Amino acid sequence: MDNKRQVLRLKVERPEDLWLLYTIIKPGDIARMRTFREIKQGERGRSSSRRIPMTLSIRVKHLEFQPFTNRLRIRGIVVEGPEEFGLKGHHHTFNIDVGSTLTLLRGKGWPRHVIRRLEKSRQWGGKVMIVAVDYDELGASLLTSQGMLNLVEKNLGIHGKEGDRETLTAKALAEAAAQIERFVEKHEPLAIIVGGPGFLKETLAKRLREAPVISSRGTRIIVENASMGGYAGVGEIVRRGTPLEVLRQEELRRAEKLIEELLTTLGRDPSMAAVGLGSTLHAAEMRALRDVIVNDEMISTYDEQVREKVEEILEMADEQRAGITIVPSNTPAGERLSGLGGIAALLRFPLESEEVP
């Protein structure tokens, strides 16, 4: 980010980043990136075309994001590019994928709540433990916003050569479960993913569910297939994207809890909640915000008046250190929020009904 907060240079590292970009970019912004453009060459009647790599800047007109496709499309008018191709004023589309790097410019500067969300996205909430086990070895690692922390890799050697295989298996898994339980107590992961080939992972998962520390915390245990145990199996599970999907689900569960709390509050004491754009804006102006819940469609809408009011609410929420939860509209939580006007807030202090527009 530049000193004036006008220019952002971003690298997309995971699918969640694409959705985040979809909610912060709006028509009129300038997007610049390395891209390919179909260029016709040769005389009329004998012309051919080829895709040429180049850097273009476009003024954004439209965005398209399809959930679960891991791609964001940004359409706009070329405002800067190689002069020899005469592309200024022509339409162009950027296809943004995981791994893409782009620069965004906004003349008025990027709001603080946007910067805050971008910074937060670099350090997503929660940790997930990944355990990969087979009859040869077990590996356990912790996925955090700072990266992977390898916890333990140990040889199990369960082959039944030195006694009853069933007894050896039970002993090895009991020791492994006890060690993982200590890791859970220390690191407090949101969930544990247990993977590996065969049925051994199921047996270990059952032991972990019954472990006192894990069951008392309500830590989720998820079973996943992997072709091997040890750190290699852990890496296989991470590359498949399962841990990030677990974190995404946890975010949605938190959104569901907030909406449940909102509905309970509306039934018990409506003065402690605001529902809809007008009421939430009024609560923001009264500096009463505790938690704001908003559908992504409200942020990315092409209705400029609605979008400006939502941005104003989020700016004030940021100033008031209120929580901001943005919910994908195509989820059950998002659908429930749509029924409440797409945006709502839980308040720090009551606002009488006659105060709320």
Image (spheres, rainbow, N blue to C red):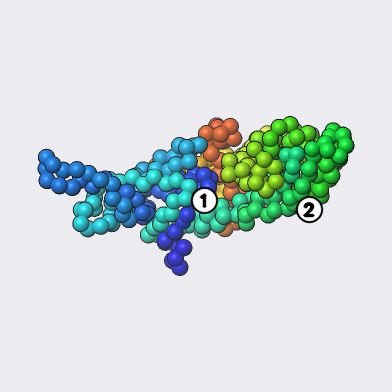
Number of dots carrying numbers: 2
Q: What residue is at 16 percent from the left and 43 percent from the top?
A: 47
**Distance of label 2 from label 1 (alpha carbons):** 28 Å
Circle 2 SS class: helix
Residue underneath mark 1: 13
Residues packed near mark 1 inside 10 Å, few (<14), some (14 to 19) or many (20 plus): some
Q: Nearer the viewer, residue 284 or 246?
A: 246
Q: Position of residue 155 (x, y in %)?
A: 77, 47
Residue underneath mark 2: 186
> In this image, 113 relative to 108: left or right?
right
The numbered mark, 2 or 1, whose residue comes first in the sequence reads 1
64 relative to 107, above or below: above
Amino acid at dot 2 = Lys
Q: What residue is at 67 percent from the left and 48 percent from the top?
A: 231
Q: Nearer the viewer, residue 18 or 345?
A: 18
Q: Quadrant of residue 337?
A: top right
Q: Nearer the viewer, residue 320 or 19?
A: 19
Mark on residue 46? none
Q: Quadrant of residue 71?
A: top left
Instruction: Find out whether the residues at labels 2 and 1 contact each other: C-beta distance under 8 Å.
Output: no
Residues packed near mark 2 inside 10 Å, few (<14), some (14 to 19) or many (20 plus): few
**Residue 269 seen in the figure:** no
